[in-house]
Amino acid sequence: LQNYYQYWKRKYFRLSQHVEGGAFVDYQDNRTTCSEALGYGMLICVYMSRLDGNTARKDFDALNIFRRQFSSSIDLRLTSWYIDDNLAKPKKTTCATDGDLDIAYALILASHEWKRPRYLAEAKKILSGIEDALIRPDYSLRRGDWDINQHAIRLSDIMPTHFDVFAQVSNRQLWQRVKQVHYAILQQISLGEGVFPDFVVKGKTGWKPAPPNFLESSYDGMMYYNSCRVPWRLAAQPQ
């Protein structure tokens, strides 16, 4: 595990050219990143901290320094989805829900692991943005702070363990309601389709797979590179 972590760092972890003390996850090998990659990187650093000591925390802080410089163009508490480190002033973009969910969760874990209240304060700020901008009145999750008119969900945004922790940190039952609503959606889709598509839309009779090219590709209504993460997210939930 430690060897693979070092391989991951060599392949993807990059110091920023423009953010002093910052670093990012260069998953496309072109000095660009996204909020999901930053969230994954921050989680990996926390998980590896007991094997990699102070280095993991330094890497976490570098990712967090970078993340703080790039807020969403709509809700400043959330993270810009796409960031180009080749540019001194990258263009702001809107947020992606899964990226901010993972970033908030990573900060909470970091606060617990390293006993630093400032991480928890940062997590609570992001949570307030998620609660205000990314949760609909029916408790379903928007795909980002841009997602106002379409009633659709990216199923890989369903992260039950995150929701439980957010409920504890925020002391709000809102997150348990979010969890219950999304479990019901997963159950409906599973019974009807047998597998989880990347995106689902709400119709007159309930939730159903999105049509082709709904948002990203002709596979939007199929199990593809988004929804392949659903089993992992569900398996992380303690039974």
Image: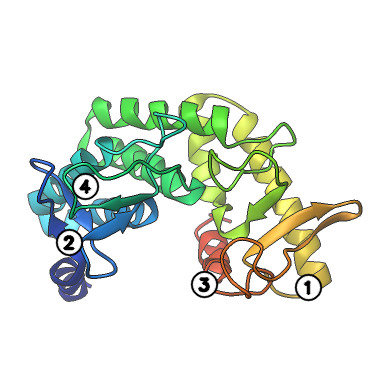
The disc placed on residue 193 is 1
Q: Which element carries disc 3, helix, strand or loop? A: loop
The disc placed on residue 13 is 2
Mark positioned earlier in the residue sequence (3 or 4):
4
Query: Are dots 1 and 2 in contact, CB under 8 Å?
Result: no
Mark positioned earlier in the residue sequence (2 or 3):
2
Query: Are dots 3 and 4 in contact, CB under 8 Å?
Result: no
Q: Nearer the viewer, residue 219 or 194?
A: 219
* Quadrant assignment, res 12: bottom left
Q: CA distance from mark 3 to mark 4?
A: 24 Å
Q: Residue at x 15, y 53 (%)?
A: 56
Question: Which residue in the structure is indicated by mark 3?
Answer: 225
Q: CA distance from mark 2 to mark 3?
A: 22 Å
Tell me the kind of residue under disc 1: Glu
Mark positioned earlier in the residue sequence (1 or 2):
2
Question: Which residue in the structure is indicated by mark 4?
Answer: 63
* Quadrant assignment, res 219: bottom right
Query: Are dots 4 and 1 in contact, CB under 8 Å?
Result: no
* Quadrant assignment, res 37: bottom left
Q: Nearer the viewer, residue 139 or 221?
A: 221
Q: CA distance from mark 4 to mark 2?
A: 9 Å
